[in-house]
């Protein structure tokens, strides 16, 4: 046992454990560390070359040893459950599926003194990258003086010529700099790659901390782990710096929900209070960038860009781009828009720059790099090419330019690569050597991870890569006290990028003093406001369809319940004394018409199962809930955590094994529970959502869909020849049996039932009630014109309300019902045309002039 570990055991014995016997702590520590053997020659965070524990690891392990192993595992099970419930996920490039976020079982811990030295090197490197960018897009002294080959700049696909000579608004090319680092064989940190294009991982680092903060709050507090809020507050202020207006509107530009890092982008937008937008949400007018909102065009002052620079403007950069904003470079030229990071900043990510950075640092900064990269040689230089060729079998080949997304296997190709792959790259190297950089890159360092065995938890060394971040703030560069760590689950796999088999780990910087626990926004007292803000058109679209899909799922579930409860062909006696015919065929036909069942000619249980949980039909309840969740995924900044929890449980409830046949009673119980989950989701929408435009659109979607579905129910079960069984099902589908029974003692009859489900303004399930609510919602939404004339969608809604108010039950035969249903569908389309993204036809609010 190492001396440090023994000392840790003595220290642990002085504390009264809360969750385990004190006598168990030394044994537990010894068992965890027993057999921990890093690979010879590979640096390790926990043990040095002599096998002694170092750094902050003894402090962490002795604190964890106070907890029993079952409690540790229970806490991580709780963390995984929280990740699932809140929808924290990621996508692998090219994969349409979402994968639950793989949070590792141990954080990476670093002492404060070591972190200070690392931060100083990171800030120096960020300043150097800023200076290089200013030079290559400006006077070009580095190339002219021979410090940087012209081909390294001009030959890079990230060098965007339209940006040459553009002075970045706010005076800075970089607002955020990141570096992937690892510990070298000498124990010093080395920069494996610079990240200046659109660095990712910041949001996942935040999510990691939030999850572990609720999993091990006592451990974080006792170890004095540095907190994030002050960094993020300063970062937000840095994003706004340089804006023309004192209270700027800041947008986070994403490529959309299918981006591999969309979840972290949404988390950052929510945490920082930014407007999450896509390219179609933005438009250039009058030389300025605007956001399409439901209130018309609103000025955007700053954009945090999370798409590649050459995709930003299809007019001046990549014409094939569908992610950017046509003409946005004009706003950068005229200084009306601040952007982080500036397009073209990815040029300094090139591995070909690495061999020249030391000389550039001596020229620009007057000192050498404190945080160095591994030795590298660009093969476009004759001397570098000769060195790489002479040492090819012991070197790592990297592309000189930033590799395309998903090209991780080509990003670093070491001597251990598969022979066939290496032969292909070497052939390309001999053909175009200037496309490659040779690098003396040793194995990545390792850190402890837990592995579960028959004897309990056990520490094993696993390779990791750490991404650290520095933000440009009004007071200079500030380093995030933590980072984004990727850890391989296997000892022979390097965690170059997030993919299956790679886990993430939180990064704890252990302070020497008590930490500041203030939350984001507590640094200054904000001015009191009571404004709802502006809702982007795309967000309104997503909220509207979220409401519609939830209501569609409810309608299908209610039909399934009616179908299952009709088993046995029970009959009902109406007020005339006649017995009603079975309604099962009508229910089956409607489920087939709605796409919830592939065929109406199926056994009762099979039909109900397909309508509830079918994966091959587009109209099943499960399909609608999945669609609702897909829309909700674009609205992560606007839905509460409780809503995500209910959605996750609802999807679990409707994710049955379709290869297994379930009985009618099993399906009935599951449908009833699913209906209660939808009721809970509706309650959360009404009780937890701020009564701003977003809430109006969610409820609008539900009201319109419910009115349309109720019309369809009435057409199917409230027709002129409807008997007691059909009318009873109609009341059930409209959830109005109790109200009807209390109001009418004689039994079911056509006109009273129609009146209750169509015209009763007091029945929250009637079409009239929905129409009145729709009218109120539309009246609360912003208008583009101040002339007092109702817009087309408001006029159509008023006409529907008037028809229902003035009508009688007997008026709504098949023709009358079909007309109301068509008007409701047209109203939905009219609302979409007015408020949702509509290409270049963006509308601006009109201002009346000349009024007294």
Image: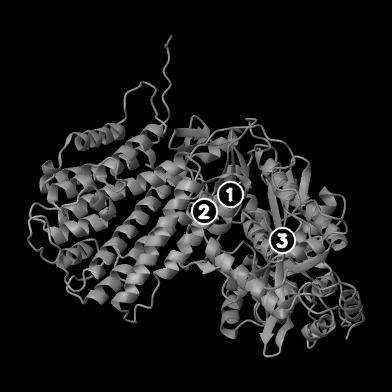
Q: Position of residue 466 (x, y in %)?
A: 72, 66
Q: Earlier in the sequence, mark 3 or mark 2?
A: 3
Q: Which mark is residue 483?
A: 3
Marked residue nearer the N-terminal end (3 or 1): 1
Q: Residue 128's x, y, as percent?
A: 77, 51
Provide the residue designation for mark 2: 636
Instruction: Identify the element where label 1 is drawn.
Output: helix
Q: Quadrant of residue 247?
A: top right
Give the quarter of the image for residue 125.
Answer: bottom right
Note whether 336 is above or below 49 in the view shown: above
In this rendering, the label closer to the viewer, 3 or 2: 2
Circles 3 and 1: CB atoms closer than 8 Å: no
Asked whether 497 or 625 is in front, the reply is 625
SS class of the residue under badge 3?
loop
Structural distance between the alpha carbons of marks 3 and 2? 23 Å
Which badge, 2 or 1, comes first in the chain's sequence?
1
Q: CA distance from mark 2 to mark 1?
A: 8 Å
Identify residue for label 1: 270
> Residue most toward the top?
852
Nearer the observer: mark 3 or 1; the answer is 1
């Amino acid at each position: 046992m190492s001396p440090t570990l023994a000392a840790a055991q003595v220290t642990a014995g002085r504390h009264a454990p809360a969750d385990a016997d004190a006598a168990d702590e030394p044994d537990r520590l010894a068992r965890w560390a027993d057999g921990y053997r890093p690979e010879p020659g590979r640096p390790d965070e926990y043990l040095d070359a002599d096998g002694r524990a170092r750094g902050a690891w003894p402090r962490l392990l002795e604190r964890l040893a106070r907890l029993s192993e079952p409690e540790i595992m229970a806490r991580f099970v709780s963390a995984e459950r929280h990740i699932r419930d809140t929808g924290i996920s990621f996508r692998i490039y090219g994969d349409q599926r979402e994968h639950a976020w793989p949070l590792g079982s141990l954080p990476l811990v670093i002492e404060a003194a070591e972190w200070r030295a690392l931060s100083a090197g990171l800030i120096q490197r960020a300043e150097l990258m800023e200076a290089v960018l200013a030079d290559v897009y400006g006077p070009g002294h580095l190339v002219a003086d021979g410090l940087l080959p012209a081909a390294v700049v001009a030959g890079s696909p990230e060098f965007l010529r339209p940006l040459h000579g553009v002075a970045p608004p706010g005076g800075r090319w970089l607002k955020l700099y990141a570096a992937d680092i690892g510990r070298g064989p000498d124990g010093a940190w080395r920069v494996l790659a610079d990240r200046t294009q659109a660095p990712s991982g910041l949001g996942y680092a935040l999510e990691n901390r939030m999850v572990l903060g609720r999993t091990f709050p006592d451990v974080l507090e006792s170890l004095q782990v540095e907190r994030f809020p002050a960094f993020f507050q300063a970062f937000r202020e840095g994003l706004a710096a340089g804006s023309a207006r004192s209270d700027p509107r800041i947008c986070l530009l994403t490529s959309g929900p299918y981006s591999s890092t969309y979840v972290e982008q949404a988390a950052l937008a929510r945490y920082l209070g930014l407007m999450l937008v896509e390219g179609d949400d933005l438009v250039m007018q009058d030389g300025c960038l605007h956001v399409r909102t439901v209130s018309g065009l609103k000025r955007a002052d700053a954009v945090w860009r999370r798409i590649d620079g050459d995709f930003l403007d299809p007019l001046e950069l990549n014409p094939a781009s569908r992610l950017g904003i046509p003409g946005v470079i004009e706003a950068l030229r005229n200084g009306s828009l601040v952007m982080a990071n500036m397009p073209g900043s990815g040029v300094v990510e090139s591995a070909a720059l690495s061999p020249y950075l030391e000389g550039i640092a001596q020229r620009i900064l007057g000192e050498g790099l404190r945080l160095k990269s591994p030795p590298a040689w660009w093969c476009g230089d004759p001397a570098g090419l000769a060195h790489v060729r002479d040492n090819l079998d012991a070197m790592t080949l990297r592309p000189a330019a930033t590799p395309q997304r998903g090209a991780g296997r080509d990003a670093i190709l070491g001597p251990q690569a598969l022979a066939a792959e290496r032969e292909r790259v070497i052939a390309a190297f001999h053909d175009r050597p200037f496309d490659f950089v040779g690098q003396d890159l040793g194995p990545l360092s390792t850190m402890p991870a837990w592995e579960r065995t028959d004897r309990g938890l056990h520490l094993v060394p696993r390779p990791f890569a750490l991404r650290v971040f520095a933000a440009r703030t009004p007071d200079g560069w500030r380093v995030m006290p933590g980072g984004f760590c990727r850890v391989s689950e296997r000892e022979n796999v390097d965690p170059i990028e997030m993919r299956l088999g790679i886990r993430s780990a939180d990064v704890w910087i252990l302070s020497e003093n008590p930490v500041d626990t203030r939350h984001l926004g507590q640094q200054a007292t904000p001015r009191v406001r009571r404004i709802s803000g502006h809702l982007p058109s795309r967000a309104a679209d997503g909220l509207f369809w979220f409401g519609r899909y939830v209501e569609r799922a409810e309608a299908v579930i209610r039909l399934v319940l009616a179908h299952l409860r009709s088993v046995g062909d029970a009959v009902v006696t109406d007020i005339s004394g006649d017995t009603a015919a079975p309604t099962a065929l009508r229910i089956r036909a409607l489920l087939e018409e709605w796409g919830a069942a592939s065929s109406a000619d199926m056994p009762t249980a099979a039909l109900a199962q397909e309508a509830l949980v079918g994966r091959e039909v587009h109209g099943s309840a499960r399909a609608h809930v999945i669609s609702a969740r897909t829309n909700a995924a674009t609205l992560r900044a606007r839905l509460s955590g409780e809503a995500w929890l209910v959605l996750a449980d609802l999807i679990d409830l409707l994710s049955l094994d379709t290869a297994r046949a379930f009985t009618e009673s099993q399906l009935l119980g599951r449908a009833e529970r699913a209906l209660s989950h939808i009721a809970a989701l509706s309650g959360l929408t009404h009780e937890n959502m701020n009564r701003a435009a977003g809430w109006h659109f969610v409820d609008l979607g539900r009201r319109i869909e419910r009115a349309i579905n109720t019309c369809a129910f009435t057409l199917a079960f409230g027709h002129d020849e409807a008997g007691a069984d059909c009318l009873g099902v109609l009341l059930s589908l409209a959830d109005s049996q109790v109200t009807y029974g209390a109001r009418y003692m004689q039994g079911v009859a056509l006109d009273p039932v129609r009146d209750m489900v169509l015209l009763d303004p007091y029945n929250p399930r009637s079409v009239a009630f929905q129409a009145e609510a729709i009218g109120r919602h539309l009246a609360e939404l912003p208008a583009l014109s101040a002339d007092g004339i109702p817009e087309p969608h408001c006029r159509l809604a008023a006409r529907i309300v008037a028809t229902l108010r003035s009508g009688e039950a007997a008026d709504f035969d098949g023709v009358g019902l079909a007309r109301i249903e068509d008007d409701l569908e047209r109203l939905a389309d009219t609302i979409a045309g007015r408020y949702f993204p509509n290409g270049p036809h963006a509308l601006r609010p009109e201002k009346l002039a000349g009024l007294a």
